[in-house]
Image (cartoon, coloured by chain):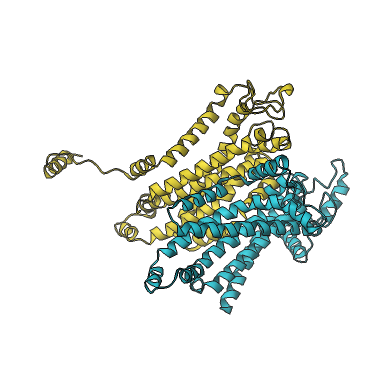
Chain colours: A yellow, B cyan
Amino acid sequence: MQTTPKSANALKAADGGKIATKSRGYWATVWLSLSRDPISIVCASILVLLVLIAILAPAIAPYSPSQGAMVDRLLPIGSPGHPLGTDELGRDMLTRLMYGGRMSLLMGILPVFVAFAIGTSLGLMAGFFGGWVNTLVMRTTDVFFAFPAVLLAIAISGALGPGLGNSMFALTLVFIPPIARVAESVTTRVRLLDFVDAARASGANSLTIVRVHVFNNVMGVVFIYATSLVSVCMILAAGLSFLGLGVKPPTAEWGLMLNTLRQSIYVQPWVSVLPGFMIFTTSLCFNLLSDGLRGAMDLKR
Amino acid sequence: MFLYICRRIVYTIPIALAVAVVCFSLVHLAPGDPLSAVIPADAPAEVVERIIQAYGMDRPLPVQFFAWLGRAVQGDLGFSVATGRPVTQEIGRALGYTFVLSLAAAAIGFLFGILFGTLAAFFQGRWSDKLVTGIALFGVSVPHYWLGLLLVIIFSVQLDWLPSLGGGSGSWINRARYLVLPAITMSFIPMGIVTRTVRSTVADLLGSEFVTSLRARGLGSSRIANHVAKNAAPTVLAVMGLQFGYLLGGSILVETVFSWPGTGYLLNTAIFQRDIPLLQGIILTLSMFFVALNLLVDLLQTLFDPRVRRN
């Protein structure tokens, strides 16, 4: 720290009087690149808005999500007092869509987040230590890859029985193996690079090498991959609820709402498909944002 | 080559065994007694014991597993708790429907996927590329059960062109009419994924040095396309094989929307009737198909591309 003024002065002199600014960090560069991409900005804004609406639902929703008036059943979009109509039990659709976002977003994001933490740890371990650890972890993931993902999620949550916790557990389990596989392949590649040997030669222990040298290199790639899984998880989670394996009625959740409104497509077709439109919008935004992030984080390009 | 094929087949055996273990343990993952659906709540203790013995549930788990596996290999997956019919018979009836649906969806999805992907790769950055990329994005982002409902609303409810529920009966034209909507619905995901794969693979090939050198030697565009197709085939084939497997195993949502009497619909019934032997049987059958399909794709890939063998 004591040498800082001196070196700053030296730089000042070399730079013709201007103080040299520190070069932007990696994440700052990514952020700058992302903020110049209009599609990413629009998608991120929509997602932030949806999350805010979901969090603030109790404060801003016009009606109660669980109580409806039977006389107001299945009103069309644009009815006075019910801008998005009402559902089969006369509950306000706008309110239910706002509340539904809480469960749907939670079920779409949390399993990937947990799977990201567990999968990355497993992949790092397998890739870094190699040998029997690698064999054990990777052969176990091979077994999971022998099932189609949708079937595995439905099988596990079907066997466990309906429920929010069970379906989230099933989704987490489905997303761990692919994340672990990506983390393992990147770690194996990074481990063989010269700077890891250099660090070991200078006396760094395994933990330090993983923490300082390997972790950051692996993280970016796995993170991009995990963001691309969120859209899949949204669709799959809502799909489990659509089958009746997720949350139980009368909880508002987009997939479950789509299921209960299915009988009403002959009466109010466009009200019935609104929850699906929300799932689609969210999934599309996550997909586009993930693509944008991939572009922004690929600094080699 | 022969040795490679043998090695690849031998490697599949432990995977298939592990898949069987997972399917078997599903029963024990289920909360409560797996026999709770069979045994009446007020049954006397000796009856309960006799039922447990009849199902072999009193033996240690590994013994149960191998007994179950031994029967499964011979085509005996037990009896459905709900209907009392053999599980194999129930699955056999549904499997044909799922096969037809998956094949139709795969045919539509792969055809348009290859067409769109090639188009996009040849016209990179142009409006046709952007349109195709948009369609592919739609295909991978849309919840297909919702897309199914939209198609039902448009083509069954509003236009009244096509039926929306059931598997159809009678003449094959009538059956085909029932197939159209679910097949189109299911084709969107493989269409999106195959489009993306073909686009990136063909784009990479078109930018590679060997294509430039072919051009320099004065080859016509149709002969260059031939070279590109040969090189893109292994990758695209692998993705298509996987997608077909996903269609077979992941048809439950679309089959539920359209009440299509395939394995997915049966699985849905099994889950909600807590018909564990049926559930186990369906999962085992579908995942074994997936394992076999993966093997087939790998073998086909080596036939197309000898480089794969060396890795």
Q: Quick one: B122 or B265, which is closer to the camera?
A: B122
Q: Residue at x 69, y 54 (%)?
A: B25
Q: Which quadrant of the rendered structure holds the N terminus of chain A?
A: top left
- Residue A47 makes an appearance in the image: yes
- Residue A101, position in %: x, y? 57, 33
Q: Quick one: A9 or A136, which is closer to the camera?
A: A9
- Residue A128 makes an appearance in the image: no
- Residue A71, position in %: x, y? 74, 22
* Residue A110 horizontal side relative to residue A73, left or right: left
Quarter of the image where one finds residue A202? bottom left
Quarter of the image where one finds residue B90? bottom right
Q: Residue at x 58, y 55 (%)?
A: B191
Q: Quick one: A179 or A288, which is closer to the camera?
A: A288
Q: Residue at x 53, y 67 (%)?
A: B234
Q: Is residue B121 above or below residue B153?
A: below
> How many numbered circles are shown?
0
* Residue A195 horizontal side relative to residue B262, left or right: left
Most distant residue in the bottom direction: B2
Q: Is residue A146 above or below residue A41?
A: below
* Residue A137 horizontal side relative to residue B253, left or right: left
- Residue A235, position in %: x, y? 59, 44
- Residue A260, position in %: x, y? 70, 35
Q: Is residue B80 above or below residue A263?
A: below
Q: Quick one: B110 or A219, which is closer to the camera?
A: B110
Quarter of the image where one finds residue B65? bottom right
